Structure formats: C-alpha cells, structure tokens
Image (spheres, rainbow, N blue to C red):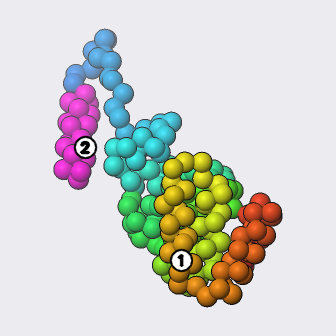
Amino acid sequence: MRGFVLVGVLILSSAAIAVAAEPLTGNPKPVAPQKSIPLAGEEPYEALKRGDFRVAAGLFYPLAQRGDARAQYNLGLLYASGLGVEQDYQAAVKWHRMAAGQGHAGGQNELAQMYAKGQGVQPNQVLAYVWFSMAIASSSSGSKTEITKDRDRTASRMTPEQITKAQQMAEQCQESKFKKCGEK
C-alpha cells in the first residue's frame, strides 16, 4: 500500500513539474484534476473499501462528532483494531457507547464484547449481558443468532443473581431507550 501511495505521489509530482516547466503560451493545456487524499466529498466507506483506513478515520471523525451512529460505530472499530489510527480501546469504547446509545446494534454488540473482554473498561459480565441483550433486540439481521450465543456464553460465567440483575438492567435500558443502562 505504501508503495502504491509513493508511486502515486511521484506521478503527481512529475506531472506538476512538467506543467510548471512547460513554456507559457497563449493556449495552456487543460490540466485534469488529480485525485487527492481525501477526495472532496468522498464517503468514508469508499476509503474503507480501498483499505485506506487513515483517510476513513479522518472522514468518519466529523460525522461521528455530529452524532452519526454509523460513523461512531465504524470509528470505534478502527480504534479497537488500530487500523488507520493508534489502537485505543478507551476511544473505541467511547465511540461504541455513543452508537449503542442511539440503538445501533453493531455498536451495542461491540460495547458488549469490550465489557466481556475488559478492553478499554473493567471487565463486567453484567454490563456485557445487558448490551448483548440490547444488540439482540436492535438487530434485524441474521447476526441475532451469533449475538445470542455470545450472550449465553457470558451468562455461563455469571451467577444466577447476576443474570437476574442483568435482565432487570436490560429491561430498564430498553424502556429508557438506552439512557439508563447501568453505566455511569
């Protein structure tokens, strides 16, 4: 990827030098617009498709700040994986929590995973169970089966009292539209 970018920079530089060195005439050659990184108006998802995670993160950030749940979720994934940004589990939790609070099933699932694994937060099986439950309720796809398996695996490490508490918290979370989910 770096080689591809380097070649692109060299080509663009050569074209700019050639145009600058060309003698001035009454009829200048039209210069085709060159692709820059990031492209004006480019969707961050195009950058993801290209594998340009740094650009995608830069494009997701302002959208996420403005409250776009999909951008928050994707930015959280980039921080969790360290793709395009320095790996930062606490930043990933922040963005996933924001997406989860808007009912984004992916954000809810990722937040649950982070609580289950203790990534960016203290491990908390009760909150993991709550957020897995929210992800199941919010999901409209076939991922419900996998999320349910994850929740059940989490429950297998919990006491009956913890499960009861988690179920009550999940109900409160759902009723409050993700505002009262047991987190500070």
Location of mark 2 (residue): 9
**Mark 1 or mark 2: whose residue is earlier in sequence:** 2
Give the side of residue 175 with respect to residue 56, left or right: right
State yes or no: residue 3 in magenta. yes
Rendered location of residue 106, percent (x, y): 55, 57
Q: Residues within 10 Å of mark 1 (few under 14, many from 20)?
A: many
How far from the left and from the top, in percent, is residue 118? Answer: 50, 81
The image quarter containing residue 93 is bottom right
Q: Nearer the viewer, residue 53 or 150?
A: 150
* Residue 158 against residue 81 in the figure, above or below: below
Q: Position of residue 145 (x, y in %)?
A: 51, 58
Distance Cα–Cα, label 1 vs label 2: 49 Å
The secondary structure that most of the magenta stretch takes on is helix
Residue drawn 59% across and 67% down?
Answer: 132
Asked if residue 127 is among those painted magenta in the image, a careful observer would answer no
The span shown in magenta is 1-20
Residue at figure coordinates x 65%, y 55% from the top left: 138
Look at the numbered disc 2 and give the secondary structure of its residue: helix
Say what amino acid the circle numbered 2 marks. Answer: Val
Question: Is residue 104 at all visible to an observer of this figure?
Answer: no
Label annotation for residue 154? 1
Placement of the C terminus among the 4 image quadrants? bottom right
10 or 149, nearer to the observer:
149
All told, the count of numbered labels is 2
